[in-house]
Amino acid sequence: MLVPETGEDLPRPVAPKRAVQSLSVAIPAYNEAENIAGMVDDVIREIGLLADDVEIIVVDDGSKDATAEVVRGLAARHPQVRLVRHQVNQGYGAAVFDGLDSATKDLVFFTDGDRQFDLAEVRNLLDRASTADLVVGYRAPRRDPPLRRLNGKGWSLLVTMLFGYTARDIDCAFKLMRRPVIRRLRGEVRSRGATFSAEFLVRAKRAGFRIVEVPIRGHRPRVAGSPTGAKPSVVFRAFGELIRFRLSLWRERAPA
């Protein structure tokens, strides 16, 4: 048996098929200096396999640590990385929406900067993008401390009772959407705190956008940094925002 002396007659390796041509990744971050460099590296490595053109938008929501400085260093090395900075902390919802609103690609994905998700699972969302306007992940299972899991279930139940069903894991920070969804809701979503995800989903459903849910198996415990969502001040503010949102919807539907 003759073996070719050159590789010209050997089968060429086939590059993995990318799921989409272009994708924006929005990452809200507050005091995530310990996580954000690794998070951006994860995005470049994992999501770079899924899209030919990826932009990464990190929104530093007035962090008190070196989050912004770390992102500036990343942007100097990676042209696809862009920093959006709030001079003062405006709240989780403000950081998420400013990231979404800064996106330039047709498909926009957002996740938190705490590295709790396996980004390879973004492919599962992209696989459903052709049949939906908004693809919402739910943690299966959710690998957070028991109290946070209990709070999350209670919050989702409360939102469902007040507004009807939208998603089983409302605050799961693993969502993919088409940019027209963002443009349509730009002037409607007013929450700038922890109620943002609930209001965004409720208004998207009422606007007639198609919503599909996908299980996310690769949820991991946080290994660095400190979550702020369970602070009493954040929780009380979220309840206040939720009640105001419920009242505003009643006023919007009331006859003139």
Image (spheres, helix red, strand yellow):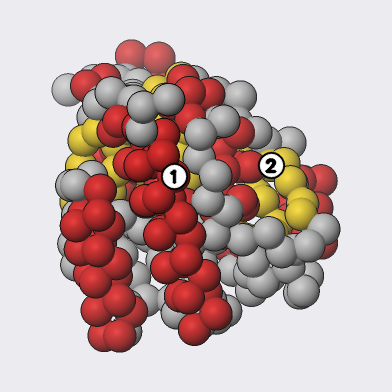
Residue 159 in view, yes or no: yes
Nearer to the camera, 115 or 86: 86
* Mark identifier at residue 248: 1
Q: Is residue 30 above or below residue 227?
A: above
Residue 139 in view, yes or no: no
Residue 244 position, x and y percent, is: 46, 55
Q: Residue at x 29, y 67 (%)?
A: 155
Q: Residue at x 22, y 69 (%)?
A: 153
For mark 2, give the secondary structure.
strand
Q: Is residue 250 above or below residue 59?
A: above
Residue type pointed to by label 1: Ser
Residue 149 position, x and y percent, is: 27, 76
Q: Is residue 187 left or right of residue 184?
A: right
Q: Quadrant of residue 31?
A: bottom right
Q: Is residue 191 above or below residue 66?
A: above
Q: Quadrant of residue 1?
A: top left
Q: Is residue 124 above or below residue 20?
A: below
Question: Which marked residue is nearer to the observer: mark 1 or mark 2?
Answer: 1
Q: Residue at x 59, y 68 (%)?
A: 35
Task: Judge the density around disc 1: few (<14), some (14-19), many (≥20) Cα neighbours within 10 Å.
Answer: few
Residue type pointed to by label 2: Val
For mark 1, give the secondary structure.
helix
- Which residue, as the protein is rendered here, is positioned at the far top? 9
Task: Judge the density around disc 2: few (<14), some (14-19), many (≥20) Cα neighbours within 10 Å.
Answer: many
> Which residue is disc 2 drawn over?
81
Q: Quadrant of residue 250?
A: top left
Q: Is residue 92 left or right of residue 59?
A: left
